[in-house]
Amino acid sequence: MPLTRYSGISEPADLDLLQRVFDLLCKERRLAQKDREQREALAEEVVIVFQNGVITEAELMKALSKRRKA
């Protein structure tokens, strides 16, 4: 369920999903722990896309992956 439905409160399953997608994207983009600004920007991007209704792992990866097919 999108975060907006909960007025900023999310379910543990939502947070798990967002963490999984974030971790996969960090690995794909080769963002190390020291790349704090880039990781924060990516985290914000993941949450915004999720809040806009993209709510499955596959959909999030498709929307945010740099390896998207043209």
Image (cartoon, grey):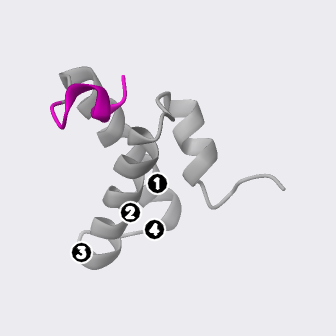
Q: Earlier in the sequence, mark 1 or mark 2?
A: 1
Tell me which amino acid carries mark 4. Answer: Arg
Camera-nearest residue between 52 and 31: 52
Q: Are marks 4 and 3 in contact (CB under 8 Å)?
A: no
Tell me which amino acid carries mark 1. Answer: Leu
Q: CA distance from mark 1 to mark 4?
A: 8 Å
Residue where numbered disc 3 is placed: 36
Q: Are marks 1 and 3 in contact (CB under 8 Å)?
A: no
Q: Earlier in the sequence, mark 1 or mark 3?
A: 1
Q: Position of residue 1 (x, y in %)?
A: 36, 22
Residue where numbered disc 2 is placed: 42
Camera-nearest residue between 2 and 36: 2
Q: Earlier in the sequence, mark 4 or mark 3?
A: 4
Tell me which amino acid carries mark 3. Answer: Arg
Any part of residue 67 in sight: yes
- Quarter of the picture containing the C terminus is bottom right
Q: CA distance from mark 4 to mark 3?
A: 12 Å
Residue where numbered disc 1 is placed: 25
Residue where numbered disc 4 is placed: 30
Q: Earlier in the sequence, mark 2 or mark 4?
A: 4
Q: Residues within 10 Å of mark 1 (few under 14, many from 20)?
A: many
Secondary structure under the numbered disc 1 in the rendered image: helix
Secondary structure under the numbered disc 3 in the rendered image: helix
Q: Position of residue 41 (x, y in %)?
A: 34, 69
* Numbered disc in front, either 1 or 2: 2
Q: Residues within 10 Å of mark 3 (few under 14, many from 20)?
A: few
* Numbered disc in front, either 2 or 4: 2
Q: Which residues are magenta?
A: 1-9
Give residue 35's mark: none
Residue lying at the far left in this picture: please name it. 9
Residue under the image location 58 percent in, 35 percent down: 59
Q: CA distance from mark 1 to mark 3?
A: 14 Å
